[in-house]
Amino acid sequence: MIKRLFLLAGFACLVASAATAQGILGGHVTGNVQLDAQVSHKDSVIGADDVPENLLMNARADILYTNGDFSAGLRFEMYQNPMLGFDPQYKGQGLANYFVAYNGSWLSVTAGNFYEQFGSGMILRTYEDRYLGLDNSLLGLNLTFRPWQGVTIKALAGRQRIFWSYGEGIVRGIDGEVNFNSIIKAMQDSKFRATLGASFVSKYEPDESIPSASDPEYRLNLPLNVGAAAVRADLGFGGLNLQAEYVRKGQDPSALNGYIYRPGEALLLDLSYSQRGFSASLQAKRIDNMGYKSVRSQSGEMLFINYLPAITKNHTYAFLTMYPYATQVNGEQGLQADVMYKFKKGTFLGGDYGMDMHVNSSVVATLNTTVTGGAGTEGYVVNSGIGDLFYGDASVELARKLSKTVKLNVTYAYQVFNPEAEGHSGLDLVHNNVVIADLSWKLNKKHSLRFEAEWMGSDSYYDATDQHHADRRYGDWMMGLVEWNIGTHWFVSASDQYAYNDGIGNYYNLSVGYTHGATRLQLGYGKQREGLLCIGGVCRPVPASNGLTFSLTTSF
Amino acid sequence: MKKILFAIISLLFAGSLMAQGAKLPENITLKSIDGQSVPSSAIQNDGKPVIISFWATWCKPCNRELNNIKEVYEEWQEETGVKLVAISIDDARSAARVKPHVDGNDWPYEVYLDQNSDLKRAMNVVNVPHTFILNGEGEIVWQHTGYQDGGEEEVIEKVRELVK
């Protein structure tokens, strides 16, 4: 089956390309292919389990045909068997996504699988993240009208992908947005900028039998249609910007919220000021019972209609992502402040080349609630004040060129993490200090080296025999990394992470990569710590592994 | 297994045949840094080459690439007339921080937001950074994924070949 599909796709491409070259069809075929494979062996020290298949593999190919305003696409996916950390329900292969689309200047139509977002996505966002194994694309119809410059109206309907099938719930939505600087002549060159938008989304799902919490003899009277509405504004004046969105959702008893009938709401505010070489922004978020899925009985990460962004900085250094934060869809509130400043060259702090400073701090806590009942009731009431601290961090990052060939980046961060954010209640808060030095050194035109040293001091400690301390992240860590770049094609890197006062071993890794144009091959060998892989505030647990990984990506 | 590999290779081969002449997709809606909707066809440079760089605020190599190009950008423009268009793929978590990020870094580029990844998908971008070069007719003549220090040299070499 799979071979035939691949051969068919290859053949179709060849025919299409021949036709293109001859100008018969006049279109273009483009695409991308990704293949990831993994060999993992048992390692009881780091907690890696045996993999009976020996080899795990994820692969996909997107093929896109474009001809003027018309396009069509196919995606083939294969998980034989899914790599560690991916949901086993992905096992299998086949056509995972297909569409035809017309993209005109005032009208766009997509029939098939599509990805769409209303506003910031807090009311509706279908998207995919191949590294998280997430895809909640809608299969259906998506229309976009642009009747006048500055006015956009979107309408859609469909059902959402879950692994290899589609959820039973039907999602319908409409969204409108007006940019006043485009439609009002007098505002065209104004310093004041304004865009307003509004959306409405509804999902329908057949009835089912869910027992009431107060009397299991009775079943819940479930709403078959659950609606949500949102309003948003994007205002600017010179360097000043304000973005705001408010969403309200009707009664939506679901597995996520324990089948309570409290309406949901969410607010996201972002105020920023920026000018050349300086920027400051402040973000606030409040979420109350806003998990919105097209199938009410689904927990987990699939079938979300909306996307609730995390309000914390998206860190990329290894130790800063060890205790990641993911949005609590049932309720949280948070603040984030971010400042960037460029010290000019020639000043005391700027030196000969200038220095960049980036300061960020965020704090997230639960709502202060009082539970009033279980399934079938309003669930809880929200009191004033804040609930438990779930996450907080503060970081300072300085980047400075030391000479023509050497660049140094130094980061200090302080973190507070509540294990309850990952569902482990009754554990102590974890406090960490992290220091990172990242130095790149250009040896000559062809060769460059990069060194990274990280240290993390923590008030937690690891003890396999005590469930309060059995988390392999716990304790103090250090890490070193060396990366050697040869031209723009090759890189070789070696790294080791070591929990030095716990004796849970080294996590070493060796990698070689080759890039040519839009093709990249990477081969790695080493140990991977169990943990959460997080992208955009959505996380998936990744178990420990020990062995070989291979990755190929290419676009054409 | 061999057949699968063979199929993949033939697919890649077929792809390389077709890559020539593929154009920048039109009518994909992007947001300007001031919040206005702009069709992707607005990305042009009066018949001169355009560099398109997909990036994100949280992507370290992207920031290295755009900062390193900044140091030589004026020279590039004077020599070749090239323009760099930076397409941010930041989603709701960080999209509001794109403008502050661009200003804070003092980047001289034309910047658009592709929050729903429409252009990213249409141009088959898998990971950021991913850089394209368009010739004066808007055809994709070169692309590269990833960034290593010095990678900008290869970019300007290709641009020079186009304006010769």
Image (tube, coloured by chain):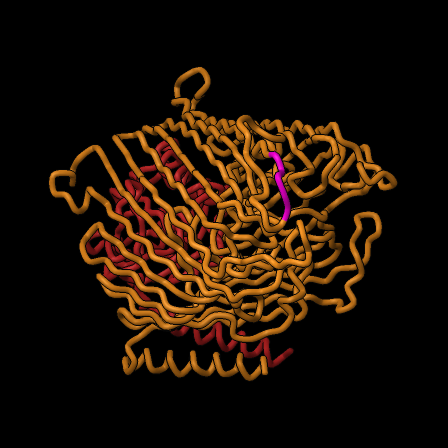
Chain colours: A orange, B red
> Does any portion of residue A522 appear in the rendered image?
yes
Q: Which residue is found at the position 62% from the left and 50% from the top?
A: A375
Q: Which residue is found at the position 75% from the left and 39% from the top?
A: A498
Q: Residue B153: image x %, image y %?
A: 41, 47
Name the quarter where the N terminus of chain A is drawn.
bottom right
Report if residue A157 lies within the magenta region: no
Q: Is residue A367 above or below residue A65?
A: above
Closer-to-camera residue (A487/A276): A276
Q: Residue A473: image x %, image y %?
A: 73, 39
- Type of secondary structure dominating the magenta stretch: loop
Q: Is residue B123 above or below residue A237?
A: below
Q: Which residue is found at the position 77% from the left and 37% from the top?
A: A499
Range drawn in magenta: A370-374
Which quarter of the picture shows residue A438?
top right
Q: Is residue B65 above or below residue A387?
A: below
Which quarter of the picture shows residue A28?
bottom left
A103 sits to left or right of A372: left
Q: How many marks?
A: 0
Closer-to-camera residue (A465/B8): A465
Q: Residue A298: image x %, image y %?
A: 59, 59
